[in-house]
Image (tube, helix red, strand yellow):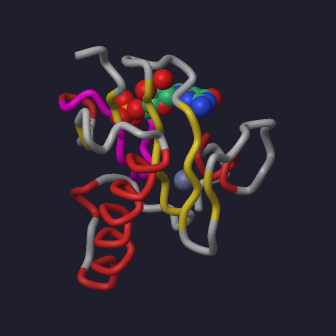
Amino acid sequence: MPDNCLFCNIVNKQTDTRFLYEDDTYVVFKDIKPAAPVHLLLVPKMHIRSINDLAPAHTSVVGGLFFLAGEMAREQKIDQSGYKLLFNVEKGGGQVIFHLHLHLIGGWRR
Ligand code: 5GP
Ligand code: ZN
């Protein structure tokens, strides 16, 4: 992993970021600049640069990310009101942290 990767540093607990969820494969924490009342980042611990870098060996880690998104949405109680899942891909797609992460965004008032 690149030693200058912010999300690797967060995954490795080199910052004081609080995890809402952690297991052997993923961490989840709040976005520091939330775009909605609920804005979580779901991050595989493994350093993968972006969606462009996915390989067949990553199939289960990416599949699990979507399953985790549903679980976190339920935990945040936004599963019924609804939410968005977003990958920004590379600079033109708005990606600024080049360590794969899924945005879970929701919690707007209906
Ligand atoms: P991207 O644009 O790469 O898809 O999303 C990166 C996200 O990480 C942004 O929404 C940004 O607000 C968030 N972010 C950047 N630095 C930090 C940080 O140090 N801590 C947390 N919790 N979020 C961060
Ligand atoms: Zn990384």
Tally the numbered discs.
0
- From the viewer's perspective, tell me whether residue 100 is left or right of residue 83: right
**In percent of the image, x 24 and y 83: which residue is there?**
56
Q: Is residue 110 above or below residue 4?
A: above
- From the viewer's perspective, tell me whether residue 39 is left or right of residue 20: left
Indicate the quadrant containing the C terminus: top left, top right, bottom left or bottom right: top left
Q: Is residue 86 visible to us here?
A: no
Residue 35 horizontal/vertical position (percent):
38, 17
Q: Is residue 65 above or below residue 41?
A: below
**In percent of the image, x 49 and y 61: which residue is there?**
44
Q: Is residue 16 above or below residue 33?
A: below
Residue numbers of the magenta segment: 93-104
Indicate the quadrant containing the N terminus: top left, top right, bottom left or bottom right: bottom right
Main SS of residues in magenta: loop
Name the image quarter holding residue 68: bottom left
80 and 73: which one is in front?
80
**In percent of the image, x 33 and y 77: which residue is there?**
58
Name the image quarter holding residue 57: bottom left
Q: Which residue, as the protein is rendered here, is positioned at the far bottom? A: 57
Residue 23 horizontal/vertical position (percent):
63, 69
Name the image quarter holding residue 26: bottom right
- From the viewer's perspective, tell me whether residue 52 is left or right of residue 5: left
- From the viewer's perspective, tell me whether residue 84 is left or right of residue 19: left
Q: Is residue 30 visible to us here?
A: yes
Task: Residue 70: say if magenta.
Answer: no
